[in-house]
Image (cartoon, rainbow, N blue to C red):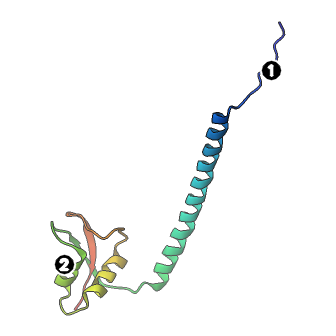
Amino acid sequence: MANSPATLTLTNRGRTVLMVSALIVATSSFAATFSAFTGAAASTTSAASSISVAAEEIIVQPGESYWSIAREIAPGVSTQDVIDQIHQLNPFEGATLQAGTKILVPLIK
């Protein structure tokens, strides 16, 4: 018996698996590249437009929100403006805060 080289034959299912795998790799590569460029652009933008603000660190208490914290630290100032400043000082994503989280808040006189 002569040894003949094995040949690879793909079934329809095998071709589908191969195509889906290639698509996943391509999508992941695109997503990683896109997020790297977006992150670089975001950090450049925030660095260029940031204004030096005096801030202090607080610990979020149970039941507190951005709104309640902003109203407490600056009662005579637009609450939304203070919330915007808090968001600029803290790179958190999302609209809610977790109790026990340390955040920076602006010192407003």
User: Residue 107 in the image: x percent, y percent?
Assistant: 25, 85
Q: Position of residue 5 (x, y in %)?
A: 80, 20
Mark 2–mark 1 Cα distance, whole angstroms, equals 73 Å
Residue 72 found in image quarter: bottom left
Residue drawn at (83%, 6%) of the image: 1
Q: Secondary structure at mark 2?
A: helix
Residue 14, image x, y percentages: 65, 34
In this view, the mark in front (2 or 1): 1
Q: Is residue 77 above or below residue 105?
A: below
**Which residue corresponds to mark 1?**
5
Q: Are marks 2 and 1 in contact (CB under 8 Å)?
A: no
Where is 26 relative to 16, above or below?
Answer: below
> Residue 56 bears which disc, if any?
none
- Give the crowd class for mark 1: few <14, some 14-19, many >=20 residues within 10 Å: few
Mark 2 highlights which residue?
A: 68
Q: Residues within 10 Å of mark 2 (few under 14, many from 20)?
A: few
Q: Residue at x 61, y 39 (%)?
A: 17
Residue reaching furthest to the top: 1
Q: Amino acid at mark 2?
A: Ser
Up/down of 8 relative to 35, above or below = above
Q: Amino acid at mark 1?
A: Pro
| Tag 1 secondary structure | loop
Which residue is more in the foreground, 89 or 79?
Answer: 79
Q: Residue at point 17% right, 89% down? A: 75
Q: Between disc 2 and disc 1, whose residue precedes?
A: 1
Task: Report x, y in % for residue 77.
Answer: 23, 92
